[in-house]
Image (tube, helix red, strand yellow):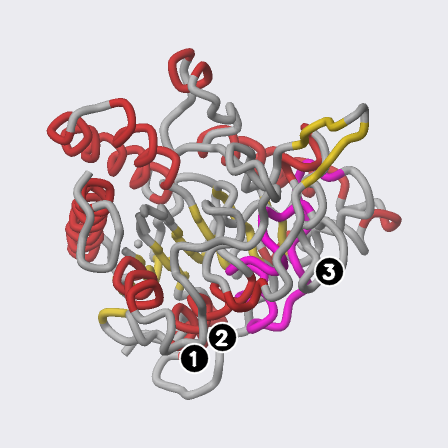
């Protein structure tokens, strides 16, 4: 079994990309890929240095793939079908999950509404942030080969262009009072939390289309493209695929090294590496201790047809038949064999928030402080 995951969170975007300008940054390393937190030491943050007060985050801007897509692909290519969403929303919510995603729990923790998807034209509200993440996307630009393999063309570079467009339109339209209750506040861009949850599709493409050596050799270029965004089958002892996870661990090792290099280049910055690989591996290997059933089982499926995924539709006697959920999704780590359940997302989000897998151990509430 192999699950891929990558996140990066940053703060401060004063003048657009590149991102890193006097940043406080936390990097999180997860088949299972990396999580990075970057925070600015702006005027508000500077007042918090050395104090115990918590950061006041006015908005979140998220970039990524299906692990944090709150509705972009659902809006663009057709609604994510039932039973997705049944645990929390009671209906499909644009998320590939029975309920909330990690980004949803982070928004809750900092007291913000769930992020509206950038491509969702109905009832979108960007006052407290925007979600640019789209299922099936990659760090690397999608060329003909990647597109032919089924990857979404809304890659990270395209999502960053969408963000720039949002900023430009905000500056143009902010004077129109009728828009203000749904638009970002211009002053919030420099104090917002910027999150990047991406990388699993790049790793998946590498491990399924390259040799072990080729996949490892491809990682430095992925790291370059990832850094530019913020800076311009063997089975192991618990039943996971060693090869896939070895590539993921190499990805994380190089990510951690790159963050270490950035520490020497950035003034007035704090960088923290968060090992989400270990967090998720711990969750899987000790699943019963945490109240989950078979760590390799999953909840959403078509009964009687193991060849179909949760998002697939089949036709029987002229009638569309969709997948069904198990009776207890909170007992499973995997929702649909690829994405996590709300319960698993909550478990991981809590470890991100409390800093228990961070080096140094920095909880999200103290991200804006520098000590």
Q: Nearer the viewer, residue 311 or 220?
A: 311
**Around disc 3, counting alpha carbons within 10 Å, would you say few (fewer than 14), some (14 to 19), or many (20 or more)?**
few
- Residue 55: image tag: 2
Q: Nearer the viewer, residue 142 or 334?
A: 334
Is 117 covered by the magenta stretch? Answer: yes
User: Residue 235: x, y in percent?
Assistant: 20, 48
User: Residue 301: x, y in percent?
Assistant: 58, 45
* Tag nearer the camera, 1 or 3: 3
Relative to 74, residue 336 above or below: below
Is 34 covered by the magenta stretch? Answer: no
**Around disc 2, counting alpha carbons within 10 Å, would you say few (fewer than 14), some (14 to 19), or many (20 or more)?**
some
Name the image quarter holding residue 313. top right
Residue 198 shown left or right of residue 73 in the figure: left
Label 1 and label 3: CA atoms lie apart by 36 Å
Q: Mark 1 = which residue?
A: 48
- Residue 89: image tag: 3
Label 2 and label 1: CA atoms lie apart by 8 Å
Q: Secondary structure at mark 2?
A: loop
């Amino acid at each position: 079994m192999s699950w891929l995951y990558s996140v990066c969170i940053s703060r401060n975007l004063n003048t657009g990309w590149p991102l890193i300008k006097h940043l406080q940054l936390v990097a999180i390393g997860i088949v299972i890929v990396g999580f990075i937190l970057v925070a600015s030491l702006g005027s508000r943050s500077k007042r918090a240095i050395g104090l115990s007060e918590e950061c006041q985050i006015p908005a979140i801007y998220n970039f990524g793939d299906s692990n944090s897509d709150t509705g972009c692909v659902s809006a663009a290519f057709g609604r994510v079908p039932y039973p997705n969403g049944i645990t929390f929303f009671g209906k499909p919510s644009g998320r590939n999950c029975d309920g909330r995603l990690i980004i949803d729990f982070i928004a809750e923790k900092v007291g913000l509404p769930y992020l509206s998807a950038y491509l969702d034209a109905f009832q979108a509200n960007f006052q407290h942030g925007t979600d640019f993440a789209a299922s099936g996307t990659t760090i690397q630009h999608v060329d003909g080969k990647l597109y032919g393999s089924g990857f979404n063309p809304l890659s990270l570079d395209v999502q960053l262009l969408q963000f720039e467009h949002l900023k430009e339109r905000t500056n143009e339209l902010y004077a129109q009072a009728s828009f203000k209750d749904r638009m970002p506040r211009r002053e919030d861009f420099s104090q917002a939390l910027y999150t990047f949850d991406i990388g699993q599709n790049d790793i998946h493409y590498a491990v399924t289309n390259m040799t072990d050596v080729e996949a490892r050799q491809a990682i430095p270029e992925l790291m370059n493209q990832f850094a530019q965004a913020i800076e311009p089958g063997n089975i192991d002892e618990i039943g996971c695929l060693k090869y896939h996870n070895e590539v993921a661990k190499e990805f994380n090792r190089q990510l951690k090294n790159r963050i270490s290099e950035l520490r020497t280049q950035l003034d007035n910055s704090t960088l923290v590496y968060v090992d989400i690989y270990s967090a998720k591996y711990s969750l899987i290997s000790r699943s019963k201790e945490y109240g989950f059933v078979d760590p390799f089982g999953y909840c959403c499926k078509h009964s009687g047809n193991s060849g179909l995924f949760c998002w697939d539709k089949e036709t029987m006697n002229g009638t569309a038949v969709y997948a069904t959920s198990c009776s207890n999704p909170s007992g499973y780590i995997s929702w649909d064999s690829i994405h996590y359940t709300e319960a698993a997302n909550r478990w991981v989000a809590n470890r991100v928030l409390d800093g228990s897998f961070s080096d140094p151990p920095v909880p999200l509430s103290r991200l804006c402080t520098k000590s």
